[in-house]
């Protein structure tokens, strides 16, 4: 069922309005992509599904939408200013630049030379000036992960919601990394979105919660339509752990270009809350102690029964929205040779368009008006986008909607005018059935339930 090559996905994405190269009319910028009319719906549906599972279906997680521009002090204390680097090498022959740890046999992929410079650390964070004078003293970073502003808001959320351990704060938003070699379509880009949860727990219970979240997150991806055969867990080796992590399990997906990380679930211990907390000496902190602490806040929890403050440990499931979109497109792509069509067999809750209402003749006012009314009524139910497809060519309309993954095509034809029924065509089976218009809303709601 999956696409055989990345090229097939890239081509479908451009052809049907999912994803375009960004800044394309001026030659594009590497590692930046724009989501088109279908892409934005798919992406929003994926994010909504995550948000629902994190916030609406639980009572122990709160949401947040914090700023992207981040004070340097935050990223100093989080360790990103000093350690958020990739090893950069230059090819002395063709002058191309590469990430050392991604080279095969220390060879330049461009000209095959092995004459490379020694690797040097390259910080991945983007900087921008704040205020009218750009003299290098007043700047902010574009956040490299959404997590840090969850930590800096820890006390705000506790004080405004009365949460007690264990509980989480979840956020979806943009993150930016100046990747040395962005590649593989939207897999490795410089501007992307993350869906991150920071789940705060009592120290000592962290390993149990870590395992729990790995299971939950694995199953969630299966629920989105990823087949078990294409997904696996990988325990990150100690030497490869991020500076904040005690243990990380990656959810790996078989992307068209190889088996790579879709989501990482890290045990960040008390590293971040500890690093952002004033007067750390009061606490038994296992996190790396930072110099020049200037935070004004104690990011800790007061345990009444034990009469002491503790810094919670945190478990972080961190998923890439763009990598999720790529994985789901790949899972859903089906070249149905028998019926000469490409089908995007997305789970209905993710489909960019839930139903297309198609009048059989584009110039027949009666058919078109009836189709418009059906579209309006179904749209009101609020399950996602319903579209009036008035292109006048029923065969082409079906092909188009197969390719963008629309589960239901509803056709208004001349029989409709006689007996008040429409045909509903199922994307996957291509079977059509006639349904009375009076039953349509309940049919539609039940289908997506
Ligand atoms: P990688 O090793 O592939 O660079 P990472 O371990 O640095 O990824 P994390 O810091 O754990 O990634 O970020 C959490 C998630 O954010 C990743 O699992 C991935 O889905 C997403 N992500 C990270 N970097 C990028 C990127 N450059 N482009 C798209 N998504 C990304």
Image (tube, rainbow, N blue to C red):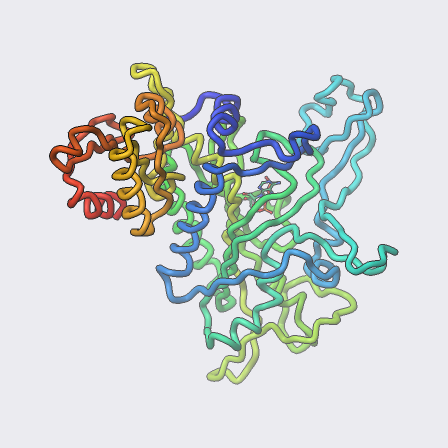
Q: Is residue 353 above or below residue 271?
A: above
Between 333 and 218, the residue placed more toward the observer is 333
**Where in the figure is residue 32, as x and y percent of width and height?**
63, 37
Q: Residue, x 58% and y 29% (percent of image)?
A: 184
Q: Nearer the viewer, residue 191 or 1?
A: 191
Instruction: Name the residue at 49% across, 25% down.
Output: 15
Question: Is residue 354 shown left or right of residue 418?
Answer: right
Q: Nearer the viewer, residue 415 or 139?
A: 415
Which quarter of the figure is the N terminus placed in?
top left
Q: Residue at x 41, y 66 (%)?
A: 60
Percent across and percent down for residue 224 are 37, 42
Ligand 1 in which quarter: top right
Name the foreground residue: 225 vs 84: 225
Picture layout, residue 95 above or below residue 212: above
Residue 394 at what x, y percent from top left?
Answer: 30, 24
Q: Is residue 209 above or below residue 346?
A: below
Res 51 quadrant in image: bottom left
The quarter of the displayed image where residue 421 is located? top left
> Can residue 79 be seen?
yes
Please say whether residue 223 is visible from this viewpoint. Answer: no
Q: Is residue 340 left or right of residue 211?
A: left
Q: Is residue 401 above or below residue 176?
A: above
Identity of the residue drawn at 73% across and 22% down: 107
Q: Measuring from the top left, give residue 426's x and y in whole percent.
A: 25, 31
Position of 139 with respect to 396 (left or right) is right
How many marks the image carries: the answer is 0
Residue farthest along the right direction in this orientation: 135
């Amino acid at each position: 069922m999956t696409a055989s090559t990345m090229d097939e996905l890239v081509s479908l994405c451009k052809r049907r309005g999912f994803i375009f190269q960004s800044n394309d009319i001026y030659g594009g910028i590497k590692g930046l992509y724009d989501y088109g009319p279908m892409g934005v719906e798919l992406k929003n549906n994926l994010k909504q599904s995550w948000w629902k599972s994190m916030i609406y279906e639980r009572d122990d997680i709160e949401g947040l939408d914090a700023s992207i521009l981040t004070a340097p002090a935050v990223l100093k204390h989080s360790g990103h200013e000093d350690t958020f680097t990739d090893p950069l090498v230059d090819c002395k022959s063709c002058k191309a630049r590469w990430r050392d740890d991604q080279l095969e046999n220390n060879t330049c992929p461009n000209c095959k030379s092995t004459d490379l410079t020694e690797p040097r650390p390259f910080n991945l964070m983007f900087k921008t000036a704040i205020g009218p004078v750009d003299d290098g003293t007043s700047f902010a970073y574009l956040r490299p992960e959404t997590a840090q502003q969850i930590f800096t808001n820890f006390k705000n959320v506790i004080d405004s919601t009365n949460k007690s351990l264990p509980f989480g704060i979840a956020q979806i938003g943009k993150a930016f990394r100046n990747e040395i070699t962005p590649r593989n379509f939207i897999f490795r880009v410089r501007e992307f979105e993350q869906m991150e949860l920071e789940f705060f727990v009592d120290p000592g219970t962290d390993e149990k919660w870590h395992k729990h979240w790995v299971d939950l997150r694995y199953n969630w991806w299966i629920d989105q339509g990823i087949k078990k055969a294409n997904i696996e867990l990988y325990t990150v080796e100690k030497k490869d752990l991020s500076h904040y992590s005690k243990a990380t399990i990656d959810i790996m997906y078989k992307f068209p270009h190889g088996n790579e990380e879709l989501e990482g679930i890290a045990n960040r211990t008390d590293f971040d809350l500890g690093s952002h907390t004033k007067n750390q000496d009061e606490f038994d902190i296992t996190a790396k102690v930072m110099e020049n602490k200037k935070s004004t806040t104690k990011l800790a929890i007061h345990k009444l029964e034990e009469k002491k403050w503790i810094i919670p440990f945190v478990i972080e499931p961190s998923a890439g929205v763009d990598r999720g979109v790529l994985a789901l497109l790949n899972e859903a792509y089906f070249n149905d040779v028998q019926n000469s069509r490409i089908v995007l067999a997305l789970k209905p809750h993710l489909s960019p368009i839930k139903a297309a209402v198609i009048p059989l003749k584009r110039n027949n006012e009666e058919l078109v008006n009836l189709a418009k009314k059906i579209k309006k009524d179904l749209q009101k139910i609020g399950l996602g986008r319903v579209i009036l497809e008035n292109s006048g060519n029923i065969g082409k309309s079906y092909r188009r909607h197969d390719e963008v993954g629309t589960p239901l095509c509803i056709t208004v034809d001349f029989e409709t005018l006689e007996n008040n029924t429409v045909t509903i065509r199922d994307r996957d089976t291509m079977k059509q059935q006639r349904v009375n218009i009076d039953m349509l809303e309940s049919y539609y709601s039940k289908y997506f339930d």
